[in-house]
Amino acid sequence: MYNSILNKIKEYDSITIFRHQRPDGDCMFSALALHSFIRDNFKEKTVKIAGNDEYDIITKKDRISDAYIRRSLAIVVDTATAERVDDNRFMEADFIIKIDHHPAIDDYGDINYVNSKAAATCEIMADMFRSKEFSSFVVSKKTCRYLYCGMITDTLNFKTTNTTYHTLDTASYLAKTGDLKISDLVEYVMNVDLDTFQKLSKIRSYFKVKEKFGYILLNKKQLDQIGIGAAEAKSHIDEIGNIDELKIWAFAVENNGMYDCSVRSKRGYIINAICSKYHGGGHSNAAAVKQIEKSSLDHLFSELIELSTK
């Protein structure tokens, strides 16, 4: 698989990197890492990052013509399904590679490199860059920094259930290769400013518990009162995850009259099967449902409450 991806990178003079809507850290940093790696090692090539939504720490958005995309190699990172890609012109590219760590439910690429056991797409990418197939290429400090940052965002600094010894070994490789200052990177990615902290304090006031299920549900009026957007609010779901008594937790927000909901659980409580009933999905312990009605959200919560008691 590595050879197939490498050969395609060598083949194309124009490369476009795509990512999913409302990109999280792993998504944005994996795109930036791939961009950095290609720029370092294939200086004659043109590589651009597509997408409209921006990540709150680092923004990277290139102006890309339709003609450029049509002649380019498209590499889509951290995106499970075609409908989630943040620029549907990726389907017009000459060749498509998908690199992802979510369960393989939509093989939309001509090459689909998916490893659902990896804790992050950045972990997959680091494995690729350190493989024998890529051994003749430079993995710069900047590339290592991006990959490490992406890994700590998706694992919450290596606290999630999908963190493995391999994840930690990969992080060690990046820290050594890039001579990284780990504490600085953790502060850079994980710290919040005072304004965000105050918003989080308001958000916590809406927290509720039923059985061993905890949740926050915010409608449009409440979001406006807090002064936070739906996507930004939902990104703070992991604020709930440190409560010892909870087995499952969720964060739902009103978005265009419907509700988007992120769900997390502790090991042994499989939630993606339940979320799939509501046209969602994800990992065993990290899943989501998008654009469902309030009545359906209530049914989803009821199933999660029941599961939390088992």
Image: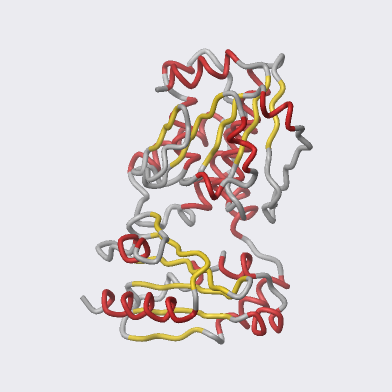
Instruction: Please name the residue shown 56% across and 73% down the image.
Output: 258
Instruction: Please name the residue shown 56% across and 68% down the image.
Output: 234
Q: Nearer the viewer, residue 109 or 236?
A: 109
Residue 140 sits in quarter: top right
- Image location of residue 33, percent across then percent down: 60, 34
Question: For this view, does 45 lie left or right of residue 217?
Answer: right
Q: How many marks?
A: 0
Instruction: Please name the residue shown 56% across and 31% down the image.
Output: 75
Question: For this view, does 133 lie left or right of residue 179?
Answer: left
- Image location of residue 22, percent across then percent down: 62, 55
Vertical comparison of 173 with 265: above or below: above
Question: For this view, does 62 lie left or right of residue 5?
Answer: right
Vertical comparison of 14 with 235: above or below: above
Residue 231 sits in quarter: bottom right
- Image location of residue 215, percent across then percent down: 45, 79
Q: Which quarter of the rendering shows the N terminus?
A: top left
Q: Nearer the viewer, residue 147 or 121?
A: 121
Residue 268 sits in quarter: bottom left
Q: Nearer the viewer, residue 199 or 169?
A: 199
- Image location of residue 81, percent across then percent down: 48, 46
Instruction: Please name the residue shown 54% across and 42% down the image.
Output: 148
Q: Nearer the viewer, residue 301 or 147?
A: 301
